[in-house]
Image (spheres, grey):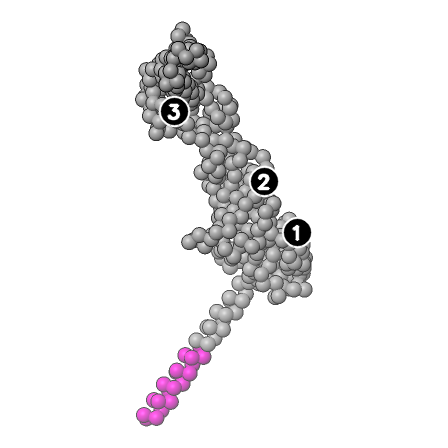
């Protein structure tokens, strides 16, 4: 009796194992079938299916970079006043365009009056000293005056000339022409002029504020040399060269493309493993502002790739697939790994299993929809 019971238990275990294997086999069969689609003649006609083979094409690899708009130091101007004073007037606003030589601010202070007064007095003293020196020189020639007195007179002329020239340079420093001032023409204010043609980046002052020589009143930008500074990883630096073309765009308006040219490639690799590459814009656009983050694409040397038309690739759950035609009405969905895109074609990273096979180029998404609807 005991032996019979053991035999019955073994038989049950065998049957259960067989049943599990059958379930697994059926499950595997279902998984395979999920990738296969069979159409009716009417569905085939409505889908408008066309096929093609994997083609070898020369495709330019695109190097994708990012960076930001930069301005070289010589094109970023900080405007300050050499001598302190109160801001009397200005019309500048951030973003405003200005021309070289245009008055951008008026500063006034009593020290400007004092400086002009000192200059005019030094000028008068110089004239008197020159007359005195001429008189002493004439007296010395007739032995009516000693050499020492003549030398002192000459020294006084030199001192007054030095004083007047120094004051004249101080006046020029604050944009006052010393040749145009007189006892009747003394001004309490000075004008600040733009040294570039460009636009205003920052305004740090307001009317009535006292500014010192250390204060930066305005920041001006000369856009003639504005450029794109992109970061390139060490392994990609050797792929770039001076004069190479770059296409840049920002995330806000990716449809707007800017053409650039590489003008400088840094030879220094920073701690992040990147080098700086400077690109000059072929045409300046005033909407491009310093500090703006940009994306860039560089077309590298073309190389042979196995490709398919882009429309033959369908995406599902984060993966790319193509449909391989088994017969006129039978199709299999096969996963592929894709690479670069160029002129409507996309490179394949695993083309071996597709070589010589008919790949659906038109109607691929229709097949995907029918296949997933069948599964549901």
Mark 1, other Cα within 10 Å: few <14 / some 14–19 / many ≥20: few
Crowdedness near tag 2: few (<14), some (14–19) or many (≥20) residues, C-alpha within 10 Å: some
Q: Nearer the viewer, mark 1 or mark 3?
A: 3
Is residue 350 inside the magenta stretch? no
Residue drawn 58% across and 35% down? 283
**How many dots with numbers?**
3
Q: Name the front one of labels 2 and 3.
A: 3
Q: Rounded to the nearest whole Å, what is the CA distance between mark 2 and mark 3?
A: 39 Å
Circle 3 sits in a helix, a strand or a loop, which is it? loop
Question: Dot 3: within a 10 Å radius of its alpha carbon, few (fewer than 14), some, or many (20 or more) residues?
Answer: many
Q: Quadrant of the N terminus?
A: bottom left
In the rendered image, residue 338, in percent from the top left (x then y), is placed at 56, 57
- Quickly name the residue at label 1: 48
Res. 171 image quadrant? top left
Which badge, 1 or 3, comes first in the chain's sequence?
Answer: 1
Q: CA distance from mark 1 to mark 3?
A: 75 Å
Front of the two marks 2 and 1: 2
Q: Which residue is mark 2?
A: 259
Q: Are marks 1 and 3 in contact (CB under 8 Å)?
A: no
Where residue 165 appears, as percent x and y from the top left, is 42, 20
Q: Position of residue 48 (x, y in %)?
A: 66, 51
- Any part of residue 300 in sight: yes
Task: Answer above or below: position of 136 versus 40.
Answer: above
Q: Which residues are magenta?
A: 1-19
Q: Foreground: 110 or 152?
A: 152
Callout 1 secondary element: loop
Position of 328 compared to 279: left or right? right
> In this view of the protein, can residue 363 be seen by the observer?
no
First reached walking from the N terminus: tag 2 or tag 1: 1
Residue receiving disc 3: 81
Tell me what residue is drawn at x 39 percent, y 26 percent. Answer: 80
Report if residue 12 lies within the magenta region: yes
């Amino acid at each position: 009796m005991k032996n019979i019971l053991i035999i019955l238990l073994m038989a049950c275990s065998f049957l259960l194992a067989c049943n599990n294997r059958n379930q697994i086999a059926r499950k595997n069969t279902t998984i395979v079938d999920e990738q296969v689609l069979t159409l009716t003649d009417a569905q085939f006609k409505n889908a408008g299916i066309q096929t093609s083979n994997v083609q070898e094409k020369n495709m330019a690899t695109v190097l994708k970079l990012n960076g930001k708009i930069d301005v070289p130091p010589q094109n970023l101007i900080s405007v300050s006043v050499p001598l302190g004073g109160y801001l009397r007037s200005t019309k500048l606003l951030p973003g405003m365009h200005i021309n070289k030589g245009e008055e951008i601010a008026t500063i006034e202070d009593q020290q400007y009056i004092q400086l002009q007064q000192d200059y005019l007095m030094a000028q008068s003293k110089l004239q008197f000293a020159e007359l005195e020196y001429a008189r002493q020189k004439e007296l010395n020639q007739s032995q009516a005056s000693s050499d020492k007195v003549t030398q002192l007179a000459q020294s006084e002329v030199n001192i007054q000339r030095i004083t007047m020239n120094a004051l004249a340079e101080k006046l020029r420093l604050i944009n006052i022409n010393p040749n145009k001032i007189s006892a009747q023409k003394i001004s309490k204010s000075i004008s600040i002029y733009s040294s570039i043609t460009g636009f205003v980046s920052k305004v740090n002052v307001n009317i009535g504020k006292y500014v010192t020589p250390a204060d930066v009143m305005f920041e001006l930008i000369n856009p003639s040399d504005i450029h794109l500074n992109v970061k390139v990883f060490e392994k990609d630096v050797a792929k770039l060269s001076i004069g190479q073309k770059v296409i840049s765009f920002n995330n806000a308006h990716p449809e707007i493309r800017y053409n650039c040219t590489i003008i400088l490639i840094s030879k220094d690799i920073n701690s992040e493993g990147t080098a700086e590459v400077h690109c000059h814009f072929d045409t300046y656009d005033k909407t491009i502002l310093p500090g703006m983050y940009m994306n860039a694409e560089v077309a590298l040397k073309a190389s042979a790739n196995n490709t398919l038309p882009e429309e033959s690739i369908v995406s599902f759950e984060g993966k790319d697939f193509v449909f391989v035609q088994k017969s006129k009405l039978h199709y299999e969905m096969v996963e592929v790994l894709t690479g670069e895109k160029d002129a409507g074609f996309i490179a394949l990273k695993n083309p071996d299993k597709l070589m010589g096979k008919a790949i659906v180029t038109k109607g691929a998404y229709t097949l995907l929809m029918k296949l997933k609807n069948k599964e549901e």
